[in-house]
Amino acid sequence: MRKAGRTGVLLAMLAAPAGLFAQVNKPVKSITVKGTVEFTDPKAEVQKVWLSKDNFSGKPVLVDSTVVGKDNTFTFHIKQDHQGVYIINALNWDRATLWSDADAKVAMRGYDTARYKVKIPHYNYVEGSYDNNFINMVALNGELNYRRMIDEYNMEYYAKKATDTTWIAYMKNTKKYNPMRDDYKIREDVLIRSFIDRPVLVYALRGMAGTENTAQYEKAMKMLETLIARYPWLTEAQKLKQTILTNRAQAMKLKTGQPMPSVKYPSAQGTTEGLEKYKGKYLLVDFWASWCGPCRQAIPKVKELYSAYKDKGFEVVSISIDTDQKAWKKAMTEEAMPWEQLLSDNKDKTMEQFQFSGIPTMYLIDREGKILERFTGYSEEAEAKVKDIIAKGTVAEPKKTAAMPMMGF
């Protein structure tokens, strides 16, 4: 009897995925999403929540908005052609992501009550379907990876400042059980294998593909092609394929040795300026914004670099992606940067053209106007590389890129 009982349970477990697979072939036309916001913004007269649909073009589409009730609740009724990825933005402070194949619930923190406020959404668990749990777990994996990155960065920073070198020596010489990137990848691989035949897999493929011709890129594109064939209604998969290929083509134009794209932006003086006038000098192009803490923390270091190497043919240009001109001008006054200041007149276009999603992002350009290096964030390693390039008079040479295999696109 005990043995038969175990067999029955096992058969039930094995049967569940088949039933679930049958469900995903039938698009879900409507669902209800209910949520709560624990902390509201004391400075806002109206507490709003926005709902956007991710069409995988890089620009989610706003589909609805509502006001948080006096009981701190909100509700969305979603009408759709098929299930997909939706993003809830609470008060412009907190976010949650869900897969819309069943009714869902989410308890959000909302306003940041910390003394030092940062608009970086924390992890929110959404109660929903079996497939929705894939988004929950992928989002948590990303959140844990981000927190570990901050911890490791801070540990290294303070270890380098310590007078006792034991700490930094230990960090450099002790092999970790799993480096941060490997830890993230192991968890990602398990999640993908568990949901390999599900349409919600599209949520993870954007970050997995990247723009480099690697085994991971090819694997991601192959899985994307499988989703497109298996779920013809999943237009997001088709759009994602187009977005990845477009981004890859643009990324190839930003490789070492390629000419810096010709762009013109409004200056702080009201004129329109480009970068061509800096030919003959090394140029550091810094994409930043007034609201970006790491950007502003990097400015004093860039000032030191500029002061030390300006007479050796080194220049800096800052290009802000601020959408609030007053905030941009206020930050410029506070930071007093002694180099040219430009403002992007189309943030999304600039981020797409120069292929970045986080700031500060910096490009180092050689005397001929060709790309030498790209830095994500400002670090001691980046600073050392800039100094070495200037000292040696390095010229940008194109890096060889492996030929892209035919994949039936």
Image (cartoon, helix red, strand yellow):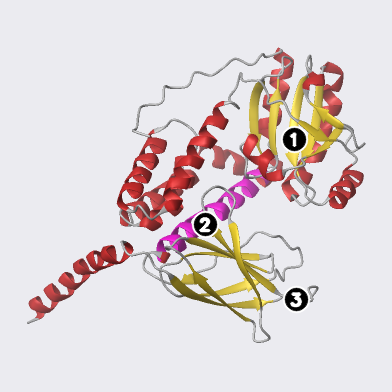
Vertical relation: 53 (above or below) 216: below
Q: Residues within 10 Å of mark 2 (few under 14, many from 20)?
A: some
Quadrant in the picture for residue 113: bottom right
Q: Identify residue type, mark 2.
A: Leu
Quarter holding the N terminus?
bottom left
Is residue 178 at all visible to an observer of this figure? no
Indicate which label's residue lies in the foreground, 3 or 1: 3
What is the magenta range?
133-157
Is most of the magenta stretch helix, strand or loop?
helix
Where's residue 242, x and y in %?
A: 48, 40
- Residue 154 is one of the magenta-drawn residues: yes
The residue carrying pointer 3 sits among few (fewer than 14), some (14 to 19) or many (20 or more) residues within 10 Å by Cα, namely some
Taking 145 as reference, is 109 above or below it?
A: below
Where does the C terminus fall, quadrant-wise? top left
Residue at 74%, 73% in the rendered image: 41
For the residue pair 143 and 247, the one nearer the viewer reads as 247
Spatial distance from mark 3 to mark 1, Cα to Cα?
36 Å
Q: Secondary structure at mark 3?
A: loop
Considering only order in the chain, which callout, 2 or 1, is on the residue closer to the N terminus? 2
Residue at the image point whose x is 69% and y is 39% from the top: 350
Q: Residue at x 86, y 48 (%)?
A: 331
**Residue located beneath label 2 in the image:** 144
Residue 355 in percent (x, y) is at 61, 37
Residue type marked 3:
Val
**Which residue is under mark 3?**
46
